[in-house]
Image (cartoon, helix red, strand yellow):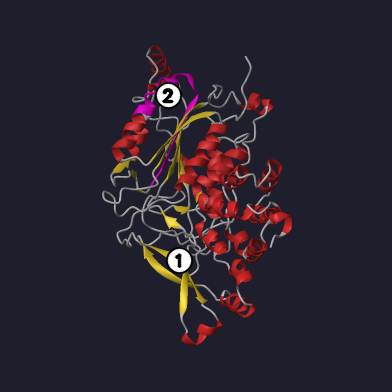
Amino acid sequence: MLGECGMLERDRRGLRKCSVTLCKEMVVDELFIQSLQTDDILTDSMAESILAEPTSHKRSWRLLSLLPKRGPRAFSSFCSALRDTEQQHLCALLTESPERDGERQCPQTARAKDRAEEVISTTYPIQASGRYALFTKTPVKDGEKERDEEKERYVDSPLPLPTQEGMVPAKRARTQESMEMCLDADSPITSPVLPCTPDFYLSHCQQSYSMVSSPRGLALVISNVSFDPCAAPDLDSRKGGEVDEEVLRKVFTELDYIVTVRRDLTAPGMRACIEQFGRRQQHQTVSSCVVCLLSHGVEGAIYGTDGQLLELDWVFEAFDNAHCPLLQNKPKMFFIQACRGEEMDCGVEQSDGPERTQSPGCEQRDAGREGEGDGDTRQMEERGRLRVKLPQRSDMICGFASLKGTAAMRNTKRGSWFIQEVNSALRFRARDTHLSDILVQVNGRIKDREGYAPGTPHHRCKEMSEFTSSLCKDLYLFPKYHPQY
């Protein structure tokens, strides 16, 4: 029996039956929509209207309202798109729905299965890599005639859980599926980077770093997602890491950087890649440089896929004024998405009262350490006759996903908290905000986020990002503005 505009009635009933779950859990992003466009299920205008919705829930609702009108192939293409975007549990929910088999069942059996679906999911804590994971099983009765036998079959429901990027000693068997809880409802922001205005550029360019080259600079993204099970048996796959790398590739491409993405490198491979990147002659003609490192980590180092550590201090050294002269006096930006310890931030209850302020007089400690008065004139004249020297390391800014000793949180569907907020802030605020203030705003957004995983230590978990800076001027990216000379 055909439903509206040719969709099978059983498929239409299945969509309607599962619509609440789909709206809650489905991630409708550009890749998902492109899959349906490729199959000619959605038109360009339909795709635009779906992606224009402000939240994931509304995007899902609009898509589900359109699908029944898109012909008999719409259901199978929809299921294929779910599989292609690693949402197999939702595909299984649809294809195993009793509504799809209803036309072949007697009414009594169909009603029995409907009642069987209305059970409450049971949540079990599973020790997973030193972390707890939610493992949800839904008991489904096999029909009225078998009720006396009290036989139940269980269907695994892979709900995503928050995971820590860090290493911990206790490990779970690799045969079990690692799962993470969806911590928020929205997929990564894909709104275009807002452009800088000519007036803003002209009023701020003098006191900031020169950012006039096109491209603005070179960007390197190293993303370790899959780790060698033999060389690094304790390092789980970083599901969601591929989302982060794509988010960074897109946003820095829009910011006019030439982006190089390298996936799954050993520690020696990361070192060689960074050394090669730092020697590229194109650094001489561009205004800046970006390096993003995404992996498991500990304080001061990140893991290669071989389980070996790469020291972050070596990374910064590779771009300092001595080792990378082509980038002297140019801003170098680093973003580190990795744990810096094993401790999970459980947060504290906020107490009433005014916030603490900085200690008075804290800026007076170094007063008077340098010479004062006319005694410095002779030294200044002597320095003027010498070649200007630079400190070993300067003009760098580095954003860290977490504080020292604590774990960073990552979502399997939408990527890490930190990269999500960096992406959003760059897209909306880079037009009129310098990078240090952007990272302050990122800190504020991370501070407000909270995990949701009832029954596990991750429930109401927190994270706090931070950044360090040796920048000597304001760093505005001046997106999409190219001065005419």
**Marks 2 and 1 close (CB-CB < 8 Å):** no
Q: Amino acid at mark 2?
A: Leu
Q: Nearer the viewer, residue 76 or 264?
A: 76
| Residue 13 locus on image (x, y percent) | 66, 65
Apparent side of residue 110 relative to residue 264 in the rendered image (left or right): right
| Residue 66 locus on image (x, y percent) | 70, 53
Residue at the left extreme of this rendering: 231
**Element type at mark 1:** strand
* Membership of 366 in magenta stretch: no
Residue 134's disc number? 1
Q: Amino acid at mark 1?
A: Leu
| Residue 98 locus on image (x, y percent) | 59, 70
Quadrant holding the N terminus: bottom right
Residue at the top extreme of this rendering: 385
The segment highlighted magenta reads: 276-295
Vertical arrangement, residue 92 with respect to residue 252, above or below: below
* Membership of 289 in magenta stretch: yes
Apparent side of residue 311 relative to residue 193 in the rendered image (left or right): left
Residue found at x 44% / y 71%: 124
Residue 324 lies in quadrant: top left
Residue found at x 48% / y 69%: 155
**Residue carrying label 2:** 327
